[in-house]
Every structure is written in structure tokens, then in C-alpha cells.
Amino acid sequence: MKKVLIANRGEIAVRVMRSCREMGLATVAVYSDVDRAALHVSHADEAYRLGPGPAAESYLRGDLILEVAGRVGADAIHPGYGFLSENPAFAEACEMAGVTFIGPPASAMRALGSKTKARQAADAAQMPRVPGSVKGLATVDEAVGVAAQIGYPVMLKAAAGGGGKGMRAVFTEAELPAAYMAASSEAERSFGSGEVYLEKLIERPRHIEIQVLADMHGNCVYLGERECSVQRRHQKVIEEAPSAIVGEDLRRRMGEAAVRLALSAGYVNAGTVEFLVDAERDFYFLEMNTRLQVEHPVTELITGLDLVQMQLRVAMGETLGVKQEEIQLRGHAIECRIYAEDPENNFLPSPGKITRLVQPGGPGVREDCGVYEGWTVPLEYDPMLSKLVTYGETRQAAIARMLCALDEYVVGGIRTNIGLFRRILLDDGFRTAEIDTGYLERLLARPETKEQANVPEDVIALTAALFAAVRKDGAASPISVPTSRWTVAGRGEGLRA
């Protein structure tokens, strides 16, 4: 392997390029028309246009990506996550073109990528799973029958998807027909398949996942767990590792189950097995993501391993180079997904030009970023700007460091969810790890949280700058205003002038 084409954009493309560069591998970026000036384009050794802005005409065009790879002599493709990362047809097309696909084989994707087939594989691997159907539902009547067997509440889910699309919670039989039609229609629009299945709704579970890595020589290890329970509409907002509730015994049992599943399906490369854990600490298989996860940095920080480099080496045919007993978890890491969205306006995307960008730093602070000052955030893609990750010897130390990093973080010109993370990290429930998949929705519904959300960040900025100006002029002030991200951004200077 000498030259890697990264079939993705944004922060994950930049992150993959960094590992490639450390290994002496040349990198190739691809871009759409709206991404011509994107950060990943400038980070690559070479960059080539795919097509117009819509993903269906650019980043989802496997034929165009392979044409570029052949033209420039790229002998491998890293898909990142999203787009074509879990598309078995693309993985097969790479193989037929003589290009290494840095991910699992198409057969493993087909066995585990479909949620219904993954449930069948879990049964074969003797894994505990959430009760429900193991194949797609053909009719509403079939859904009614399964729900009657396992009891309400139940959850409808898209067989081909993720990210909260095609999911509906159902609490009574009367709700089921409409929910079935809505879930199937959304699944068809989002994934090209309207197939849905039904499972028991476990109320207030924790979402905990196990990172696995397997090579071509039959070796497979698990790298601890990640807690992903802070979610909004089934999409992760904050991830951390390790989980505050997982001890050595539970970690071992979940890890061994995840490895069993991966080996039974002939899995190779990085993957994540997701579980729900109930109040009694019983765990149930949920699904497997057959790719690198967005939240992989927290695992890297507590294990000291570079997962992307390990992906590359496995794809080259090397062994993992690490045994299960050698993997040690140290400290605690937390990741916040920084989005261009407006929490005060139902979290709608906030595209536009970034007029000011001050990024946090210091010991134990990592930012995987895909933007820069002056860049215009497009509307065509997922609005994630960066992933802010902090590390500490303890969970409380990682939280304290994250709060400091958030105070330093300034993004001007667009709305972001930075303020939301402060509210979460200062909440007693989060600080004591009393969280589950419904935690964030409950927090957002609190009256005091709504009041905080109604105060625009520009007002907070103006207030901080006014206090700073008064104190500089020598006037007495009963309030102590510490250095904040507003003064770091220089916003007080304009007021004094």
C-alpha cells in the first residue's frame, strides 16, 4: 500500500490523512463542487473533483471514486464513516478493481450490516439480544402479532439504517399501524429500503458499545467500551470511555460476546458492537456498525492505540500486533460533537460563513476538526464541525477539562451547540453518571433548561464584554468576570473602542 484515497470529507478525512502521513502513505482527497475549498482538500497530497454538491452526485458515486483511484494510482480506499463506508457493493467493486478497501469484507457487511441479519448472527453466536423479530416485517398484521407476543412498549426500526432514521416507539396496539407506515416510509427515503423490524422497547437503558479489531489471521480483540447514552432523537451527542457503570466482569463478558460475533461472521478490520444495558446490568445485543465510529477518539485516548493506523496495517495483511491481555485502559475521555445547528430553533442546521474561530488547546485536549475561519459551512451535508475530546485521570477531571475547553471555543457567524454541552456537563445527573438514552430529552424539557436556551449567546457575549470594559476603566463592580471565550475572542475590544 502506497497511496490511499479517502472517500469522505470533513474531519474524518483529515483525521485519516494524518495517520497515513505518519506511515509514509500518500493521500488523495475527493471533493464535490461545494467542498472545493474544504479543509480536507488542502490537507491531501492530491485532490480531485467528483461532481455537484448533493452526495448522490458526488460522495455516494462509487463509480466516480474508483475512476479517480484508477487514474491517480491509488491502491487503497478508506471510506471513513457514513457515505459508502457500509456499502458491500462498493467494497466488492473495490476488490474487482484491484483496490484495497480499508474495512471489512462485503460478506461480513452483509451478515452484520443489516439489522435483521445481525440479529440472526447474534443468535448463532449465542449472544443475548433484545426480544423481537429476527427478520423484516411483511405486513402491519405481522407487526401486531410480534408485539402481542413480546408485549408493549415496542420499537420499530429500519433494517438497513441507523442514526435514528426509521425508528418509532409504540406504546399501544392502536398506535402500531400508523407508526409502522411512518417508520417504513422514512426508512425507504433514507436508505432505499422500507424493511423494518420490531423489538421490545427497553425503557431507560444505557447505550454501551464495544470496539473490536480483527485481522486476516483469525485474531480479534476488544478495546473496552464507550458510553453513548447522551442522545437526542436516537443520535449520539456525547460519548465517553470507559463507562462509569461497567466493571471488569461486565466489560469482559460484553467484550467476549462482541469478539464471538465478529469471528463467527468472518469479520476483519475495525467494528463496533452496540448493546443496551438495563438497570440490573443485563446487556442485550442491539446492532453492529461495520466501520470506524465517529467516537473512536475516546477509545484511542484511553488505550494509547491509533485505530486508523491499525486499520491500515490490517488492510495490508499484518497481524494486530497486540494481544487481549496487553490492552490496558487508563484514565477517562469525553467527546462532544460540535455541530453547526441552532438549539434555540429546534436544532435546525446553521450553515454559513465562519467569521471567527478560536479553538481550544492545552494538556489533554484533542480536537478533530474539519473547518477553518472563513470557511462556509454547506447545507448539503451533516453539519458536524468538529469533535472536541478531553482526557483526564478520572471522569471528573475529564469533565472539568472539557468545560475549560468549551469556554475557550469560539465559532462566529453561525449558531452552534457549544452552549448545550455546558448545560449537560454542569448538570448533577450527568456529573454523577445517572444517565440513560432518555436523559437528554428530559434535561431539555426542564423549565430552567428552556430558560437558559432562550438567552442568545450573543447576549451572553455582550454582558461579559460590558463587565470587562467596566472593570478595565476602574469602576467598581461587585461581580468577578473571569477570562472567558468571549474575551479571548476579542469581543470586549470593540465595545471599549
Image: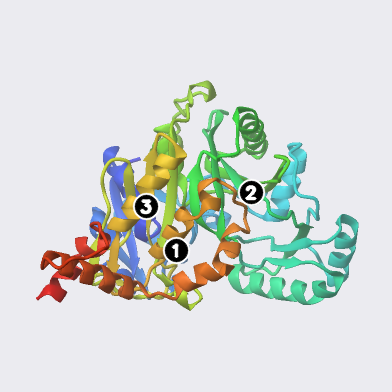
Near mark 1 (Cα within 10 A), the count class, few <14, some 14-19 or many ≥20, is: some
Whether residue 488 is situated above or below residue 454 in the rendered picture: above
Q: Give residue 403's mark.
A: 3
Q: What is the quadrant of residue 384 in the picture?
A: bottom left
Q: Tell me the residue that label 1 is attached to.
A: 420
Q: Position of residue 295 (x, y in %)?
A: 47, 49
**Cα–Cα span, label 2 and label 1:** 21 Å
Can residue 75 be seen at all in this image of the molecule? no
Total numbered circles: 3
Q: Is residue 106 left or right of residue 260?
A: left
Q: Is residue 150 left or right of residue 202?
A: right
**Cα–Cα span, label 3 and label 1:** 11 Å
Q: Position of residue 163 (x, y in %)?
A: 57, 61
Q: Position of residue 294 (x, y in %)?
A: 46, 52
Q: Tell me the residue that label 2 is attached to.
A: 206
What SS does tag 3 mark? helix
Q: Position of residue 422 (x, y in %)?
A: 42, 58
Q: First in sequence, mark 2 or 1: give its number.
A: 2
Q: Give residue 201's mark.
A: none
Q: Amino acid at mark 2?
A: Arg
Whether residue 237 is situated above or below residue 130 in the rendered picture: below
Query: Residue at the spot x=35%, y=71% of the render?
Result: 457
Q: Amino acid at mark 1?
A: Leu
